[in-house]
Amino acid sequence: MRRSLALLSVVALAFPLAACSSGESGSGAADSELSAVIAQAQGLSSQELYKKAIEESKGKTMYGIGNSSRGSTAAESFIAELQKIDPSYDGKIEWSQPKNNSIFQALSADINSAKHTYSMTLIQDGNQIQSKMLATGNLLNFIPKDWGGDQAKDGNPLTLQTIGKVFMVNNLGSKKYTNVWDFVAEGEKPMFMGVNSEPVGKNFLYMLTSPKYADELKAAFDKLPADQQAYFQKTVDEVAPDVETLGLEGDNAKYGLAWAKLWAAQYNEKTDDGPICNDLVTKSAAGSTALIVYSKLRSIEESDSASVKNVDIAAYQDDYTGFGGYGYKHYLMLTKTSPLPWTAMAFINYMSTTQDGFAAWGKDIGGYGAYSAINQDHSNDGGDEFPAKNDKGPSWWLDDSAGRLVIEDPVYTSKVSTTMGDWIDMIVGQKS
Amino acid sequence: METTSTFTLAMRRAGAYFKKPWNVVLLVVGVALTITTVSAMSAIVLDTVTVHPGQSDDPTGAGANCALFSTSTSCYTLLNWKNLFAPAMGKLLEVNFLTPLLNSVLLAAFACLVALVYGGIFAYLVTRTDMPCRKWLSAIFIFPYVMPQWTLAVVWRNLFNSAEVTGGSDGLLASVFGLRMPLWWCQGLFPSSLVLGLHYSAFAYIFIGAIFRNMDANLEEAATILNTPRWKTFLRITLPMIKPAIYSTTLLVFSSAMGSYPVPHYLKLSTLTTQYVSMNVAKAGQASILAVTMMLFGIALMVGNQLTTSGRKSYTTVSGKSGQISKIQLGSVGRWVIAGVFLVLTLFTSIYPIIAFAFETFLPNPGDYSFLRTGDPDDLTTKWWTTSDTNDSSLFGQPGILFNPTIWGGVRGQLIVAVGAALIAGTIGLLIGYCVAKNRRSKWANFVNNMAFLPYLMPALAVGVAFFIFGSSLGLFNTFALLIITGTIKYIPFASRAALNSMLQLSNEIEESAMIQGIPWWKRMVRIIIPIQKTSIISGYMLPFMTCLRELTLFMLLCSQTKIITLELDYFDEMGLYAYSSAINLILIVIILVCNTAVNKLTGASIDKGLGG
């Protein structure tokens, strides 16, 4: 009996090992083949790419995976675009959105398996993309010839859009929030998604310790009244030794770290930005604050207890000091095992270079295409009645002297994430 | 010569062994179950020492060259164990492991207590007293079990949240009546235990109720004749009789509560499951250690189960043959008061959620109860149901429920998984039950029986993790095949236990007379065994079906969130789109109730009987 059990255990262990060994072979050759295809595609116009896609995927289904469910809307529009060129085109795109953060596991599992499904991805979280996907070569970059964005900033990996999460204040309270430090003042409990359920929130805190944003925080700190400076100084001094332990650089890193610590210790964790927005617009949430995706305001219906009028965008105040929120990016990439690379690249091209392709996101406030030609104007969406919905647009939000969104940098976040991730987890864990 | 004769003897023995169909079935099913269960469990253990590219266990970046289950030693490390149990920042051990572990154990223990007390008292009142409205109360008592477990958590949150305590906006009671409860009431261990306890009290009701319903009342009557006080009779006679049911309930509720993710997630309690999901992003290896910890609890529970079942002979005061069940008189006023109390409780746990779900689908904004204050119909809307395009921004880019292909696709997906898993689990469970009953003294049969039961005692998330790693390695991620396999393995115990209990009631003579006439095994099964015990057997199919239909934790790592409806339900809940999640809840409840009623009318089988099996 024991012997048979031991034998079964060995079989059981060996089974997955044997099943997976196939995933290790052959990917190198396929990889370089795909790189050559990408290089060729980067020299083609949109129309040429679409023709290649039609040729490749007629009668087939391309599988895409992404953090945004709107990928499926863009896919429908893309298919219609291809059908304008060839009315008999009958290819399909199946779009899936994995739960929570399992997109990286889903992609890794697919790439490592013997049979590959996904051709491309629309993915967020620069830190994980850098460390899990770019460092491993699992995802490959493609820059369309017709794309007119800033290659240095948004080219590698290719950015579809920057999404703004901005500080909002329920204006039925009496307190004013005119400095970014006001959101972490004593007793404040700003609503925010959990940093481990949406890791781009953690990236935001990492970015605050980078020299650029730490300097901005120091500048905002200097503009605080003396009593508030004295209050925050205690935290700044407390975290100063951590700067070295965490391997951070820059004279003002301790200010970034202090703000991050106060935020992590005080924020009121919610499951998503949607419920936060629904809460924030109500009368009963008087004086509450939040850092959420700007576009969530679009879905509020006016009623006796809820109104967009109850909300102010902090950075729109004339006397506001400091950053107005943060921006994370949606990147478009190919899997290195892409079964239909031409179709994947044509789809990426369609979303990133045309207004129709970007319309699924571009129709709303708060999402800014990296190629400015695909953006729509939302500067008067709310008119005089709902000023919070009048989006000042990418040129304002991404300007270092205006909206000052903190923009995620995949390289920096992946560099500090190992040590700072634990540091943040410890603070968040201790409050629960 | 001698070798040849030994070989011939062995072959003859093997031939005789395999002539009995139940031996063949046991061997095949046993090997298959062992491979799937042990492989999946081994995969988690292996993951704790595997380097994960780009994560904290890959400081040198060597993981970039490692494939899954690589044979290179540089792809393995003990860093995950070190980082979890001896972290550089001392408090991380407490945050990442000790606090979640303690909370998980407390949550599971309190949930057991609530389930046993609430379900046990209810079982006693329904089966042993003259409480009025028993039939109706009994029917709606199991509703919380029928519903996805986190729906009560969402109801709790929507009811008791208040801006002053939980932040954000007021919940229903604070908003309409100004009633504000303390934080411990709104979030954390108390509401999580209560919600899970209420959800699983159906187990206690059905297990304990089954014994109360069939027990011989002679002993209690003897005690009454001897003037023994009623409380003493209960403690000394009644309670020992239901000990096996208490053990069974405790085992099932403890493991289920420990593996629950959504309830502690929504009610903000850090447990092993919530911590697993949180750590899995950047510390997958350490997260797998948490899964191994949950797995160890599952194994400990199985050992506990073995010990309690082997000791059940000492409680055989339950004959199951006496018709003398005396009903306790609660008094003409008392019986109505008690019925009233349970009426209110079950209305809150069973009926209120359904009304709240329906109401939620007509609110202008999620959680916006303006209508209750103003009475103005303009503060209600049908947009969540009837909007047919995706350009209505107030629906977050979604079409209405009736026109939402994602929702109906998810319902279809869930039905595929539930039907597939129920058919396979029900059939395998039936075969296991039959074959184990035929080989009661065989160690192999016992082993197969235990192997089939083990996944049920494993926390659902641990099983999900195991099959995620196992399935990913086989390229099965995001396939119905993986979901069906996982659902099958997890829920075979429902069918095998129901089948085993019913097969043990069958005398061998029934089959033997057919065997003498040379009727083949499959015919005996189809024509004799199954028809006789069809009620229990169909219940063995119904339970996996119903459980798969509302399962989230088990499947949440295995597919994209639009593949099955429970993942979409959770997605909508997390996004705060309560109109959609409430509508999905209603759809699920209707499907389950319609199926259960139809099967009950056609065959006499029902969920209650299966659970009690």
Image: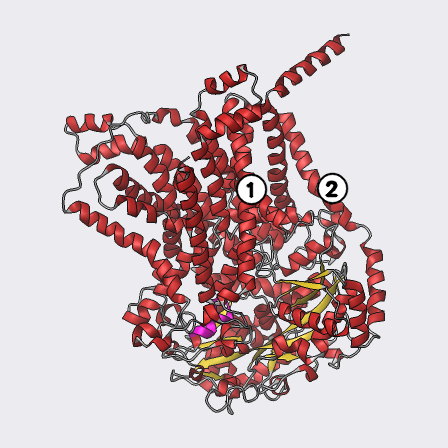
Kind of residue at badge 1: Thr
On the image, the x and y values in percent for residue A86 come to 77, 71
The chain holding disc 1 is B
Which SS class for mark 1? helix
Observer-nearest residue: A250 or A341? A341
- Inspect the magenta stretch and tell me whether residue A227 lies in it: no
Residue B243 falls in image quadrant: top left
Determine whether label 1 and label 2 are within 8 Å by CB.
Answer: no
Q: Which residues are magenta?
A: A268-279
> In the figure, is residue A190 to the left or right of B206?
right
Query: Which numbered marker is on residue B488?
Result: 1
Report whether mark 1 lies on the same chain as mark 2. Answer: no
The residue pinned by badge 2 equals: A18
Picture layout, residue B181 above or below residue A405:
above
Q: In the image, residue A419 lies at what x, y percent?
A: 62, 63
Q: Badge 1: few (under 14), some or many (20 or more) residues near its Cα, within 10 Å?
A: many
| Quarter of the picture holding the N terminus of chain A | top right
Q: Residue at x 61, y 68 (%)?
A: A68
Task: Specify the amino acid type for callout 2.
Answer: Ala
Q: Residues within 10 Å of mark 2 (few under 14, many from 20)?
A: some
